[in-house]
Image (spheres, rainbow, N blue to C red):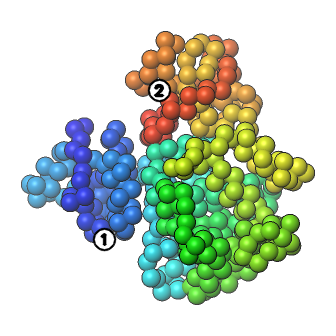
Amino acid sequence: MQLLKLVASQIKVGAPLPFNVRDEHGHLLLAAAQVIRSERQLEALLARGIHADVEEIKALAAGRKVEPQPPTLFARWGRCYWGLDALARDPLAPEDFRAACNELGDNLQSLVEQQPDVALYLMLRQESHHLRMYGLTHAVYTAALAWLLARRLQWAPEQQRTLLMAALTMNLSCLELQGRFAIYGRLTAEQRDELRAHPDAAVARLRAAGIEDETWLRAVVEHHEHADGLGYPRGLREVCEPAQLLRLADVFLAKISRRESRPALDLREAERQAYAEYPSSPMVAALIREFGPLPPGEVVSLANGERGVVIRRGATPQTPLVATLTDKRGMPCQASLKRDTSQPEFAFKALEPDRQLVARLPPERVYGLLH
């Protein structure tokens, strides 16, 4: 496939795409006929680098229609980010808002149920996302992690679903502000006030759309409260369980996400901090068990001298499936090979400090094309 790099003038916000949009490796990002809904989405795509198949460009020039390519698993994750963006931006009638909200929840829950290891990988390996997208990716990953933890804690399915929906909508009023903060690292006094008020603003938006689930609404309004009374917006000491779990996932993922002003915190340090704050919490125990010692996204070295990235948890915590990044000589792999670390030749040797090995590497490069 010969690719042509796209520029802003070739894409129109609000109009169906005339061709399939791909990354530099040819992997699908957006299918033909999908709509780029905002300048933020277009800016993030251009910053990542987007391309089209030259043959599709030729077909359009000849007056032929380009057929949409079926979305890959990772393109479906992209639809969740931009579905949330549309939900926050578009002025929808209450019934349309509820329908869009439920569709987004259905899509995300399906992705996490289908491939939980991929969800964990995406949480740890966020380097390929433009920081302006931080508000979107953070809410989606928080929802995914909260759902996984609720499932591990054996909450009822309806409680798991309510928590997922609360996480998706907890920051509806400040998604763009979060992106700016991730880039610039500072806020004006007015922006700080907006951030402190966002739980109430999100609940007001949800109530206006006809959301009546009080557990959902309470989780949103209390997700920055803390048992010591130092949280916000009300300084509560009695915080509902869904809000506690939502706060844990929210804060944990914020720590392991990079900013322009700082790198991502190491996973184990983030776990230590969570345990230090809540040493007897079953929620923290569930968090640590969910990731395990070698979660998807962790960069490791193997007994045979290769280095790679964990892509699946294994039969035991110490025997994950790894996709190679470098060969025994330290040279980059042209194509990733899958290594079962339960085999002595490929046994886990050590955590690899060089996180740049996998930085900005598209997940399709190590997972292959998943649907």
Classify residue 318 by image quadrant: top right
Which of the two marks, 1 or 2, is nearer to us in this view?
1
Question: Does residue 271 appear in this view?
Answer: yes
Instruction: Find numbered disc 1 in the image and state the secondary structure of the residue it sits on.
Output: loop
**In front of the other: 362 or 199:** 199
- Which label's residue is closer to the chain start, 1 or 2? 1
Question: Does residue 158 appear in this view?
Answer: no
Instruction: Find numbered disc 2 in the image and state the secondary structure of the residue it sits on.
Output: loop
Q: Give the CA separation, mark 1 to mark 2.
A: 37 Å
| Residue occupied by mark 1 | 14
Residue at 58% across, 87% down: 208
Q: Position of residue 338 (x, y in %)?
A: 54, 26
Left or right for 176, reference 248: left
> Hey, what amino acid is under mark 2?
Ser
Q: Position of residue 179 (x, y in %)?
A: 50, 61
| Residue occupied by mark 2 | 336
Classify residue 161 by image quadrant: bottom right
